[in-house]
C-alpha cells in the first residue's frame, strides 16, 4: 500500500494486527512499485466509488460486488486476449506475452 493518510492510523494498524495481516508499504514517491494495483485502484475509484452514492453499508457492499463481478466475469481485458479473467480460471489459456 502507499503512504496515504488513510494508512497511517492506529486503527488500521490495530485491525491488521488482530487479523494477522502484515502491512507492506511501497516506497514514498514510488507508485510504480506496484503499478498493477495502482491501475486497479484507479479503475475501481473511477468506475465504482465515484460513480455511486452509497446509502448504507449493505448498499455499498451490493454495488461493489456487482462491479467486482462485472470486472472479473464479464468485462474483457486486453492483457489476456480480450477475455474476462474468469476465462483463465475455466481453463482458457492466456495468450503469450507480446
Image (cartoon, grey):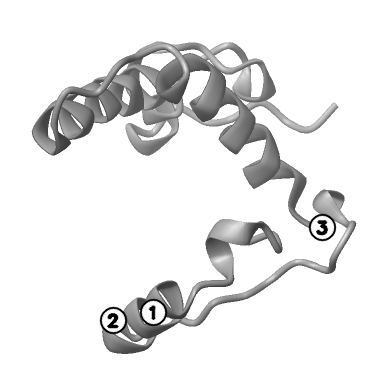
Residue 62: x and y, percent? 16, 27
- Note whether 15 is above or below 52 in the view shown: below
- Neighbour tally class for label 2: few under 14, some 14-19, many 20 plus, Cα within 10 Å: few
Residue 31: x and y, percent? 81, 51
Relative side of 29 to 86, left or right:
right
Nearer the observer, disc 3 or disc 1?
1
Residue 23: x and y, percent? 54, 77
Q: Residue at x 79, y 32 (%)?
A: 97
Relative side of 1 to 50, left or right:
right
**Which quarter of the rendered picture does the N terminus lie within?**
bottom right
Q: Do the residues bearing badges 3 and 1 touch, measured as CB atoms within 8 Å?
A: no
Residue on which the image places disc 1: 16
Q: Residue placed farthest to the left in the image?
A: 58
- Note whether 27 is above or below 10 in the view shown: above
Q: Nearer the viewer, residue 60 or 26?
A: 60
Q: Quadrant of residue 18?
A: bottom left
Q: Residue at x 45, y 28 (%)?
A: 85
> Of the numbered discs in the image, which one, if any, rests on residue 33?
3
User: Regarding mark 3 in the picture, which secondary structure is present there?
Assistant: helix
User: Which circle's residue, 3 or 1, is located before the other in the chain?
Assistant: 1
> Of the numbered discs in the image, which one, if any, rests on residue 19?
2
- Neighbour tally class for label 1: few under 14, some 14-19, many 20 plus, Cα within 10 Å: few
Q: Residue at x 42, y 11 (%)?
A: 51
User: Regarding mark 2 in the picture, which secondary structure is present there?
Assistant: helix
The residues tagged by marks 3 and 2 sit, at their Cα atoms, a distance apart of: 25 Å
User: Which circle's residue, 3 or 2, is located before the other in the chain?
Assistant: 2
Residue 41: x and y, percent? 58, 37
Q: Do the residues bearing badges 2 and 1 touch, measured as CB atoms within 8 Å?
A: yes
Q: Nearer the viewer, residue 81 or 3?
A: 3
The residues tagged by marks 2 and 1 sit, at their Cα atoms, a distance apart of: 5 Å
Relative side of 28 to 76, left or right:
right
Amino acid at each position: 500500500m502507499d503512504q496515504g493518510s488513510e494508512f497511517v492510523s492506529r486503527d488500521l494498524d490495530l485491525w491488521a494486527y488482530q487479523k494477522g495481516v502484515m502491512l507492506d508499504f511501497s516506497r514514498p514517491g514510488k507508485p510504480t512499485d506496484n503499478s498493477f494495483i495502482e491501475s486497479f485502484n484507479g479503475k475501481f475509484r473511477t468506475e465504482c466509488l465515484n460513480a455511486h452514492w452509497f446509502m448504507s453499508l449493505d448498499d455499498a457492499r451490493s454495488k461493489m460486488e456487482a462491479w467486482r463481478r462485472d470486472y472479473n466475469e464479464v468485462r474483457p481485458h486486453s492483457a489476456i486476449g480480450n477475455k474476462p479473467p474468469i476465462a483463465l480460471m475455466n481453463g482458457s489459456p492466456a495468450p503469450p506475452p507480446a
